[in-house]
Structures are given as C-alpha cells and as structure tokens.
Image (cartoon, rainbow, N blue to C red):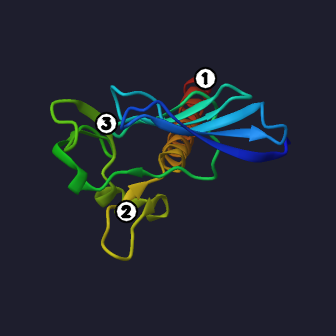
C-alpha cells in the first residue's frame, strides 16, 4: 500500500469544478482524486488513479462504479410508498412505477406484502421509515421453494410411472 502523505487542492477556476488530488509521499505520483469533474454537470466523483476505477454520484442521483462491489447484504427500497400503479402479476411479483421515475414499469416485490410471508428479508426501520428488501435472500428463498416443488413433482411422476409399469 502506498504511503499517501500529500493532499493538494486543484481548481479550474469555474465555480463548480474542483477536486483534491492525493499524492504519494514523493509529492509527484498521483494516487487519486475526489471532487467535481466538469463545468457542465455537478457529478461528484472519487477516482483511484492507480486502478483507473471511478465512483460517480451523478447529479440525477444515479451512482455508478466501474469495478466490482462487494458487501454482506444489499437492501433495495421496496416500500409501497415509493411506488405507484402497483399491479400484482404473481404470488409475490408486482409490476409498478417508481414515484421518482413515472412512466417506467419495473418488476419486483412490495415490502409491505413480503413482510407477511418472509419477514426475515425485509428491513423495517423502527422510526417508520421506508422498508427495504434483501432481494438476494428473497430470490434464494423463492428458488429453494421452486426446487422443493420440482423435487416433489418428480417424486409423484416417478410413483405414477411405477404404478403404470406394474399394472
């Protein structure tokens, strides 16, 4: 790991463009930067100059990263208060529009419903805040359900085949 000891501020002169650059102890080798990238947007970025990877918080609220992301859990906002035009299309899948993206139909769950059957995959804040769903866990549970049903059906098929064969 490089010994990073220098921080130098840099600005282009434009009011919304500026960043800090981080240097190794020699003061000349840039390791990364953090700040605003251009005068035409207010995207905020963090860039690792060694790996070339960037994390960008775009002015529209999107977050992009051009590398791998690792975490123990991911929870996605799924509270019905975040959605509109909610339509149930199967036992646990819904079509809806996000209030912040009207006119775009997306598919997923509604935490308010999932908490009734699988509370272990729903995060419900004590302060009444928006609920979220751990989709990785939820989909793993649904996959296990389907595998069990498939195994049960295969057993029934095998039993019926044996009955027909022994008739």
Q: Is residue 141 left or right of residue 8?
A: left
Marks 3/1 in contact by CB < 8 Å: the verdict is no
Nearer to us: label 1 or label 2:
2
**Could you tell whether 2 is left or right of 15 in the image?**
right
Marks 3 and 1, how far apart at CA:
65 Å
Q: Is residue 100 above or below residue 127?
A: above
Q: Quarter of the image holding residue 107?
A: top left
Q: Give the position of the C terminus as an image quadrant.
A: top right
Quadrant housing the N terminus: top right
Q: Which residue is mark 1?
A: 165
Residue 121 at x, y percent in the picture: 48, 58
- Specify whether residue 167 is in view: no
Q: Which residue is mark 2?
A: 115
Residue 78, given in percent of the width and then of the height, sits at 33, 51
Q: Residue at x 63, y 48 (%)?
A: 71
Residue occupying image coordinates x 39% and y 67%: 124
Q: Residue 60 — which label?
A: 3
Is the C-beta separation of discs 3 and 2 under 8 Å?
no
Secondary structure at badge 1 equals: helix
Q: Earlier in the sequence, mark 3 or mark 2?
A: 3
Q: Earlier in the sequence, mark 3 or mark 1?
A: 3
Q: CA distance from mark 3 to mark 2?
A: 30 Å
Of 80 and 18, which appears nearest the observer? 18
Q: Residue at x 38, y 76 (%)?
A: 126
- Which tag, 1 or 2, sits closer to the chain's start? 2
Q: Where, by quadrant of the figure, is residue 33 drawn?
A: top right
Question: Which of 147 and 77 lies nearest the eye of the viewer?
Answer: 77
């Amino acid at each position: 790991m490089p010994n990073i000891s220098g921080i130098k501020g840099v600005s282009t002169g434009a009011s919304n463009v500026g960043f800090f650059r981080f240097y190794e102890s020699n003061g000349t080798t840039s390791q990364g930067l953090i700040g605003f990238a251009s005068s035409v947007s207010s995207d905020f970025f963090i860039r690792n100059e060694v790996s070339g990877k960037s994390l960008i918080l775009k002015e529209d609220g999107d977050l992009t990263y051009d590398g791998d992301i690792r975490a123990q859990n991911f929870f996605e906002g799924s509270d019905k208060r975040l959605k509109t035009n909610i339509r149930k299309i199967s036992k646990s899948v819904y079509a809806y529009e996000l209030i912040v993206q009207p006119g775009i139909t997306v598919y997923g769950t509604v935490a308010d419903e999932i908490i009734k059957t699988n509370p272990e995959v729903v995060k419900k804040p004590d302060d009444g805040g928006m609920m979220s769903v751990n989709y990785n866990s939820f989909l793993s549970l649904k996959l296990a359900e389907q595998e069990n049903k498939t195994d049960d059906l295969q057993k029934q098929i095998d039993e019926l085949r044996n009955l027909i064969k022994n008739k």
